Image: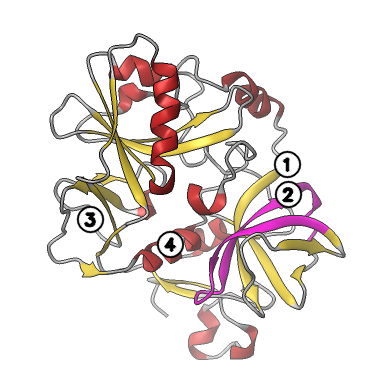
Amino acid sequence: MSDDYVGYVRPEAKCDTIGIWAHLRVLAPRCTRIESLRMSLKATILPERGVVRVGGPEARPFLQNLITNNIDLVDGKQAIYAGLLTPQGKFLFDFIISGDADGKSLLLDCDGTRVADLVKRLTFYKLRADVTIEDASAGLKVLAVWGGDAPAGALADPRLAAMGARLIAAAPVVAGAEAATPADYHAHRIALGVGDAARDFEPDRSFPLEVNFEEMNGVDFQKGCFIGQEVTSRTKRRGSVRKRLVPCDVVGESPKPHDPIRLVGREVGTVFSVDAAGERVLALLRLDLLNGAPLEIGDTTLTPHKPAWAHFEMQGAEDDSEDEEEA
């Protein structure tokens, strides 16, 4: 079989030692998937995303004192992923920050349903800073591109190379790209184990390291102060992240968001994003309780996977980084 393919094989396929099946590894006891690494370029507008524009001569130092990442890294060729936390170190907002076409303002690609809340929170911190903060969603759209080289004008998604790129414009288009849907985009990110704030994070409850902010290049511990830094730095230093948002394969009836997950009768996690067609979910799991026994939601079984990009330990879970090495 071609090295262009890696993935999982359902045991009912009766994998034997002859022919094509000899080249596939059974990774999960019940559910697996086969995916091509050669994907055609796909693009879709993400209507659920909004855009906040922060401008003015003090825009960069203003954001630098608030957000989890280093605003100095943003230029015409690079975006950053960052968050705004509570003073107690809990998640409030996340966004992908890029430079505006005018070269002076910064654009925050964020959850469209909470744009007004983000503008209000940033305005609260404004005080006398010489900045402007406005909802620019009416005139700008966010387009996600993946499966090929980033087109002109698009910036690589700073969270993960496999996520592709983003393009913000009044009417963004990508010539030659296959028209996809927002559902296609979300299936792609769920397969990669990448969370979405609107679906997977709980404002004022989630901690950034639990939802993989650091793994997604969203925290710079060397940049200096940011809101919630003390708690976040202490959590990292102590290695006390017990929960993680991770992808799981599903066998059985598709679960619903916020369904509790049990291990031998004990609740060990919660379902968030669901890709019913792909039989995958993202779930926040207590990693210290995983032991290889089946995770269950009623008669449905979940198999957690450690994503190839993850640097944390996951006992009792399939390790997708092994698949990349074998591929």
Q: Name the residue: 66% across, 59% down.
A: 258
Residue 181 picture location, percent across and down: 32, 68
Q: Nearer the viewer, residue 79 or 202?
A: 202
Q: Quadrant of residue 246?
A: bottom right
Residue assigned mark 1: 242
Q: In the figure, 183 relative to 150: above or below?
A: below
User: 96 above or below 185?
Assistant: above
Distance between the alpha carbons at the discs numbered 4 and 3: 19 Å
In contact (CB < 8 Å): disc 2 and disc 4: no
**Residue matched to label 3:** 149
Kind of residue indicated by mark 2: Leu
- Mark 1 vs mark 4, CA separation in Å: 26 Å
Q: Give the residue displayed 43% in from the left and 62% down from the top.
A: 186
Residue 182 picture location, percent across and down: 36, 64
Is 304 on the left or on the right of 47, as rendered? right
Q: Earlier in the sequence, mark 2 or mark 4?
A: 4
Decide: marks 1, 3 in contact (CB < 8 A)?
no
Q: Is residue 290 magenta?
A: yes
Q: Can residue 14 be seen in this view?
A: no
